[in-house]
Amino acid sequence: MTDAPARDISSCKFVLATDLDGTFLGGSDEDRKQLYDWIEENRQTIGLIFVTGRDPGFIAELCEGGVPWPEFVVGDVGTTIAKVDGKDLSPIASLEEDIAELWGDGGEKVRAALDGVAGLTLQPTEFRYRVSYDMDPDTFDKSVIETVEEMGHDWIASDGKYFDVLPKGISKGPSIKKLVSHLGVSPNTVLCAGDTLNDLSMLECGLPAVAVGGSEASLVERVEPLHHVYIAKGVGAAGILEAVKELNLHETPEEGATQTEE
């Protein structure tokens, strides 16, 4: 795959803002290939933003392995907002200023306060503006939630196995809306795609959205009443293309084939 094209994605007909695990990386090999090939074949009209809990190092490794490069990344569950320069991620300082200010030296304090808490295992990556744990739901000490809130931070438990501590008011939803506005992208050309509760704020933020097939039941329950959220049957990558077609956001591979035959 080539590097992400250096261009202004506000001119794109369609912008996909997608979670990775279980969403963009979800579904069958065939479904992922169809989605990725479609994006690469339409880079002049499709913009791509990753909105993920993953860190920049993981994203670079992923894309060097054949996944389409995004133009921008909202990473670390919304605490990183970056532009892709070639194969490097460059944080956009003006968009991260309030995140850094809200967090301060929160990482050190959170790690100290939650050290030894039952059911939480600190993840080895030291994120800039968040602290993340692997969670055992059977032994998790829920009193830690009060501790986190008393410290002035937000928390997200997702997929029954992850626990993230974040700056107050910062998550995927606010950060993707901030980036879309900064780029001058028309909101109705965007599709936000996710599958777990750490995608909830993104799917709730008011931009067109899809909960792909195979989504966490708790997420579907929360977003089902929202008119701007499409609930897909297709799992992962297939669910993204299903939503693009149903919401008439861009011609899909099947539609392109039909037009060619005619």
Image (spheres, grey):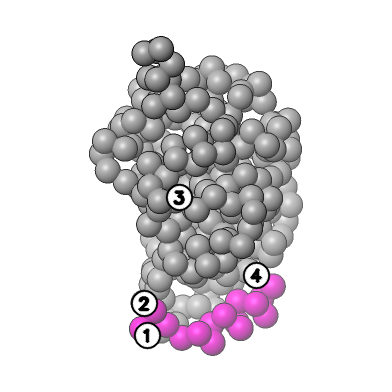
Tell me the quadrant of the picture where the C terminus can be found.
top left
| Inter-mark Cα distance, 4 to 1 | 22 Å
Question: Which quadrant of the figure has residue 63?
Answer: top left
Residue beneath the point at 65% across and 62% down: 167
Q: Is residue 94 left or right of residue 241?
A: right
Q: Gap in Å between the C-alphas at discs 3 and 1?
A: 33 Å
Against 214, is 260 above or below? above
* Image height of 158 relative to 255, above or below: below
**Mark 3 residue crowding within 10 angstroms, few (<14) / some (14–19) / many (20+):** many
Determine whether, in the image, residue 7 is placed left or right of residue 252: right
Closer to the chain start, of discs 2 and 4, is 2
Tag nearer the camera, 2 or 4: 2
Residue bearing the label numbered 1 = 139
Q: Residue 188's spot in the image, x, y percent?
A: 68, 37
Marks 4 and 1, the one that precedes in the sequence: 1
The residue that disc 3 covers is 232
Q: Of label 3 and label 1, which has the lower sequence position?
A: 1
Q: What stretch is highlighted in magenta?
A: 137-153
Nearest to N terminus: mark 3 or mark 2: 2
- Return the residue at label 2: 136
